[in-house]
Amino acid sequence: MGIQIGDGNKIKNSTIAEKIEGSSSEKKRFYDKHPWISGLTISFIIGFALLFHFWENVINWIEGWF
C-alpha cells in the first residue's frame, strides 16, 4: 500500500514564471561596475601625459590664437 498523488500528468510547454528583471546573464565590464574609479584612473593618466614638455608648445600655439 502506497500513497499516490496525482494521476501521472506531465507539464508540457508551459511557462512557470515570466522573465525576472533583476538578474541579467550578461557580464558587466569593470567600467560599468566602477565608473568613479575608472574616471579617476583615466584622469590621472591624462594628467601625467600633460606634464611632458611637448605640451608647452601646444599650449603656446593655442594661446597664440587668442
Image (cartoon, rainbow, N blue to C red):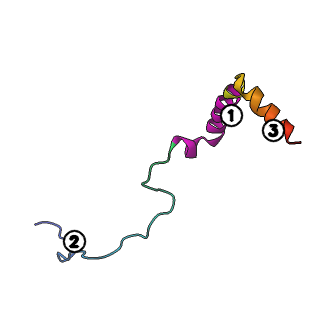
Say which quarter of the image contains residue 16: bottom left
User: Residue placed at 63% from the left, 42% from the top?
Assistant: 35
Residue 32 on the magenta segment: yes
Residue 42 on the magenta segment: yes
Measure the alpha-carbon separation of dots 3 and 2: 84 Å
User: Residue placed at 64% from the left, 29% from the top?
Assistant: 45
Disc 3 is placed on an element classified as: helix
User: Which residue carries the number 2 mark?
Assistant: 5
Say which quarter of the image contains residue 62: top right
User: Which residue carries the number 1 mark?
Assistant: 43
Check disc 1 and give the amino acid type: Ser
Say the numbered circle drawn on residue 62: 3
Q: Give the range drawn in magenta.
A: 30-48
- Kindly indicate whether the residue at mark 2 contacts the one at mark 1 (C-beta within 8 angstroms): no
Instruction: Note whether 27 is above or below 15 in the view shown.
Output: above
Among the two numbered marks 3 and 2 on one chain, the one whose residue lies closer to the N terminus: 2
- Kindly indicate whether the residue at mark 1 contacts the one at mark 3 (C-beta within 8 angstroms): no
User: Residue placed at 53% from the left, 40% from the top?
Assistant: 30
Instruction: Note whether 33 is above or below 48 in the view shown.
Output: below
Check disc 3 and give the amino acid type: Ile
On screen, residue 20 versus residue 40, left or right, reads: left
Among the two numbered marks 3 and 1 on one chain, the one whose residue lies closer to the N terminus: 1
Would you say the magenta stretch is mainly helix, strand or loop?
helix
Disc 2 is placed on an element classified as: loop
The percent position of residue 27, horizontal first and vertical second, equals: 45, 49
Pick out the residue farthest to the left.
1
Say the numbered circle drawn on residue 24: none
- Pick the residue in front: 45 or 62: 62
Image quadrant holding the N terminus, namely: bottom left
Nearer the observer, disc 1 or disc 2?
Answer: 1
Pick out the residue farthest to the right.
66
